[in-house]
Amino acid sequence: MAAAGTRVVFDAIGTRWTITTARPMEAALADRVATVIADYDATWSRFRDDSGVARIARGDAVDLGPTAPPLLGLLDGLRAATDGAVDPLVAASLAHLGYDGAGGLAAADGYRPAPRAEVVVDGTTVRTVPPALLDVGSAGKGQLVDLVLAEVVAAGHQEAVVDASGDLAVRGAPLRVALEHPFDASAAIGVVEVRDAAIAGSAVNRRDWSVEGARRLHHVLDARTGVPVETVAATWVLAGTAMLADALATALFLAPPERLAAHHDFRYVRMRTDGVADWSPDLPGEVFR
């Protein structure tokens, strides 16, 4: 990790992290943060053969630790709320389209729905019946942001921002966050204030790896069909935790906000692929018209 004043910047789990604090972070804290991230990756990465979820895919029942019940519980609730469109078993669908960690992004023909399997959670021990690979990317990075922020706050930093390339959590002084236009990275469609809360965003242009004829491939899929979403370009969600914000930012591609609002407290901005945006009436900020 490289420190500059009160900012610590480093790369982990394939993304750029920035931790900003009112006073410099101690070296021991930076080491603990690195351990938290490494442990999380060893548990949840579907791109590692030795991870906990990889062992589950091979048929084992694996103790995934205390992060498993809240994470899988949230995703199970969203699977119900979206009629199966959000599903942690979407890993097979993503791999079919080339998003498998091998680096080539070579897509097979057609699309593959998420397999029909049951995710069985017994305390912190998890298995799937039949064996299947889990992908918690729709909420996992947010949960890890929350874990890192908790480590920073526990060390006595009452003003802090943990930013994992756009999924960020804020404690202390409020932070104004620009919402990057999905069609023009040099522009913003609005700005919001995040105060003792979290914000997460998702956009199809961020992981858009192939155009084959009329087929555009990106990472936000309807798990029921394995087909990339075509009607929504970007979403942003403000919520009490980064895990919830991250999960709902994905779910808003696949379900109307009023359905999700029946289960969760959040504020949102959503832009369709035709450029039209909608947002929460009580959004703490503004969307530029």
Image: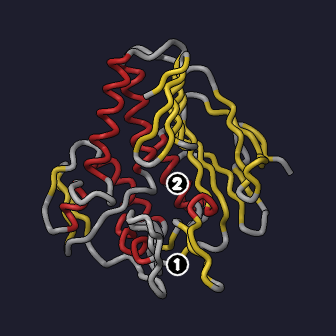
Residue pointed to by mark 1: 227
Residue 19 placed where, x, y %? 50, 28
Amino acid on which the number 1 mark rests in the picture: Val
Answer above or below: position of 130 versus 251: below
Answer above or below: position of 237 versus 96: above
x 50%, y 49%: residue = 246
Amino acid on which the number 2 mark rests in the picture: Leu
Answer above or below: position of 40 versus 183: above
x 44%, y 49%: residue = 14
Answer above or below: position of 288 versus 81: above
Q: What element carries label 1?
A: strand
x 17%, y 53%: residue = 125
Q: Does residue 103 appear in the picture of this structure?
A: yes
> Which label's residue is closer to the chain start, 1 or 2?
1
Toward the left, the furthest residue is 60
Closest to the observer, 92 or 208 = 208
Q: Is mark 2 on a helix, strand or loop?
A: helix
Residue 51 placed where, x, y %? 24, 54
Residue 259 placed where, x, y %? 56, 62
Residue pointed to by mark 2: 248
